[in-house]
Amino acid sequence: MASYATTVRDEDIARFAELSGDDYEAHTDAEAMAGSRFGGIIAHGALLVGYMSAAGTKAIHEARLRGSTMIPVSLGFDRLRFVAPVYPGDRLAVTYHVREIDLERQRSVADIEVTNQSGTVVAVAEHLMKWLQS
């Protein structure tokens, strides 16, 4: 199992909005969102996918430490769900657990869970990777 932890900052959300072009008010307009059910801006779901990818990279590093010389490439995320809002200041913990390894097809499937500082699950996904010969 691999993990990744980070604290979501206002500037992370703003930079992601700029980089991605997703300037939807839920992520960029604190004044407008103050009166919403969220009470303020929330992080982009796609930003959380980036944190999931970081945990996947940690899993790759662990495989390398165990002697793997394969080159992994992401095939994508399945069953991706954003189940609770993420706010600036939230401390996130991402766990990445490889559930299945298919040696014949050279693929792995991992379960990913993202929780906040209260232990609330905020996002989940399955990550599929293809492991290629060097």
Image (cartoon, rainbow, N blue to C red):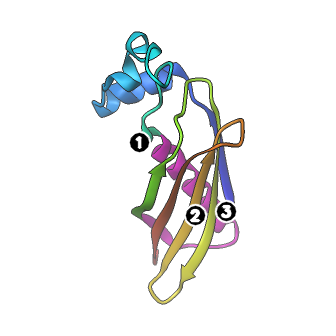
Neighbor class of circle 3 (other Cα within 10 Å; few <14, some 14-19, many 20+) is some
Q: Quadrant of the N terminus?
A: bottom right
Q: Does the magenta portion include 107? A: no
Residue 111: mark in rendering: 2
State if disc 2 and disc 3 touch (CB < 8 Å).
Answer: no
Neighbor class of circle 2 (other Cα within 10 Å; few <14, some 14-19, many 20+) is some
Q: Amino acid at mark 3?
A: Glu
Q: Residue at x 49, y 63 (%)?
A: 127
Residue 62: mark in rendering: 3
Q: Residue at x 36, y 27 (%)?
A: 17
Per the image, the residue denoted by label 1 is 46
Relative to 18, is 71 on the left or the right? right
Q: Earlier in the sequence, mark 3 or mark 2?
A: 3
x, y (%) of residue 43? 47, 31
Q: Secondary structure at mark 2?
A: strand
Q: Which residues are magenta?
A: 48-74
The extreme bottom residue here reads 104
- 134 or 17: which is nearer to us? 17
Q: Amino acid at mark 1?
A: Ala
- 52 or 54: which is nearer to us? 52
